[in-house]
Amino acid sequence: MRLKRRDVLAGLMAAAAMPGPTLGSDGIVPITAREGKLRLAPPGYPETAIWGYDGGVPGPVIRLTQGTRLHRRLVNRLSQPTAIHWHGVRVENAMDGVPGMTMDAVPTGGHFDYDCRMPDAGTFWYHSHNQSAEQVARGLYGPLIVDEPDPVDVDHDVIVIVDDWRVTEEAQIHESFGQMHDLSHAGRLGNYVHIEMLPRLNTLRRNERLRLRFINPSTDRILELGLMGLEGWVMALDGMPLEAPRPLDNILLAPAQRMDVFVDVTAETGEALILQKERDGGYVLAEFAVQDGVSRSRRSEPKPLPPNPVQNVIPGEDMRKLMMVMEGGAMGGLRDAVYKGQRMSMRDLVTNGQVWALNGVAGLPDAPWVRLSLGEKVQISLVNDTAFPHAMHLHGHHFREILPDGGFGPLRDTLLVNRGQRREIAFVADNPGKWLFHCHMLSHQTAGMKTWLQVGEG
Ligand code: C2O
Ligand code: CU
């Protein structure tokens, strides 16, 4: 029996060795969502049963050059329907991978062909967008790297994925999905933070320069990371280069956010570290032995990465003004909201597993929250009227924050809005289609915190 055999095979098996998903005559490369095993916990513990692309977590690194196209056939060998979303990539709407909105979920045994252009260079990622609070927690995600056309002057280019897992004492994924306490509070927080570095480096030389591409695929955890013996600059956020490199201090990553940093190995002797910071101190996620360098001094400050071709809003420009109020959750004081077209009390909302609302609506409405004409410039006030932070993510576009001093922040696709905060974002609605706007704390998204925009006709 095929299924049985797959279960027994370890996650290290390459997809090519699998009883092959049928290649079309076009030879499109498959990416198979299936069960696998991950060495998550230290030796002595069993491997962790996961769901992964090609059976691994993270899924295969997809690496392309800016301006080229990504072709992949998603093959579903899971027991649940699934879909891939290319997070942060300004794809055509039909390739956005949102079941019920841009495609049908791929059933068990089915497949879907993705073909999308990569307009921007940077660090992106892909993940399941169906029952994502469960599927991403089980491991259905991977890095998507789009290279600048010209090489960048670094010695190592490393993808750093830091994920938060909720595991049992046997190092197996805790099957506690959709618990109301998680949904209504800070989400499904884990008990085991795990780092994956691709490639895995053990030794560094003094004065080497590294590009570290941090990705937070955690369903709900906001990560705070730090470095020791590595000093440098923030170069890009959510795949989009900063206009000027910014000296690096803290690495704060809400779920789905990315940060590209360039760091030089400055440790005098011994070791350099990547740390996870928590209220009560720090945990070492990775350590590197540092050896004498080839070069005696540091390089000079890096030039900014080349900008991506994003239509920008300009300070002072006329924009359509909208407001998005986040409500609900525990200690949030939400009394009622509309769900599936009906006004419901908080109690009935809880019965329906919906405890968060955007502008008084819980869950995905049939009609868009707003219709924007193609090319329209919009400013959205994000008002967090809840007791929790939220990582608001817009599909198909990057936006800029309008800062309190009137200046503009960097381009982002996911913005962390803390409790009680009001933040302004602005963008040009230049990508036609139906685009989700949701909290990327996937537990919150599941429990109602999502809506959508229509850009252009539709
Ligand atoms: Cu990263 Cu709607 O998702
Ligand atoms: Cu949230």
Image (tube, rainbow, N blue to C red):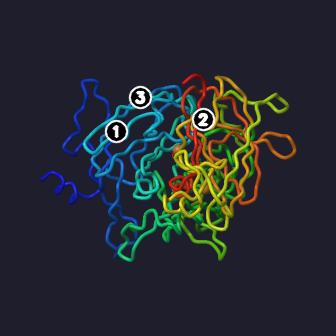
Give the Cα separation between the discs numbered 3 and 1. Answer: 11 Å
- Residue 33: x and y in percent read 33, 47
- Residue 287: x and y in percent read 54, 65
Give the left or right position of residue 205, taking residue 408 as reference: left
For the C terminus, the image quarter is top right
Binning the other alpha carbons within 10 Å of mark 3 as few (below 14), some (14 to 19) or many (20 upward) gives some
Q: Which residue is depicted at the point 33% across and 40% down?
A: 106
> Would you name the residue on which mark 3 appears?
115
Q: Which amino acid is tagged 1?
A: Leu
> Would you name the residue on which mark 1 appears?
74
> Disc 1 on helix, strand or loop?
strand
User: Is residue 247 or residue 166 the one in the foreground?
Assistant: 166
Give the Cα separation between the discs numbered 1 and 2. Answer: 26 Å
Binning the other alpha carbons within 10 Å of mark 1 as few (below 14), some (14 to 19) or many (20 upward) gives many
**Could you say which quadrant of the image residue 289 lies in?**
bottom right
- Residue 238: x and y in percent read 61, 44
Q: Which amino acid is tagged 3?
A: Asp
Q: For the residue with label 2, is its CB less than 8 Å from the closest atom of ligand 1? A: no
Does label 1 or label 2 sit earlier along the sequence?
A: 1
Mark 2 and mark 3 in contact (Cβ < 8 Å)?
no
> Disc 2 on helix, strand or loop?
strand
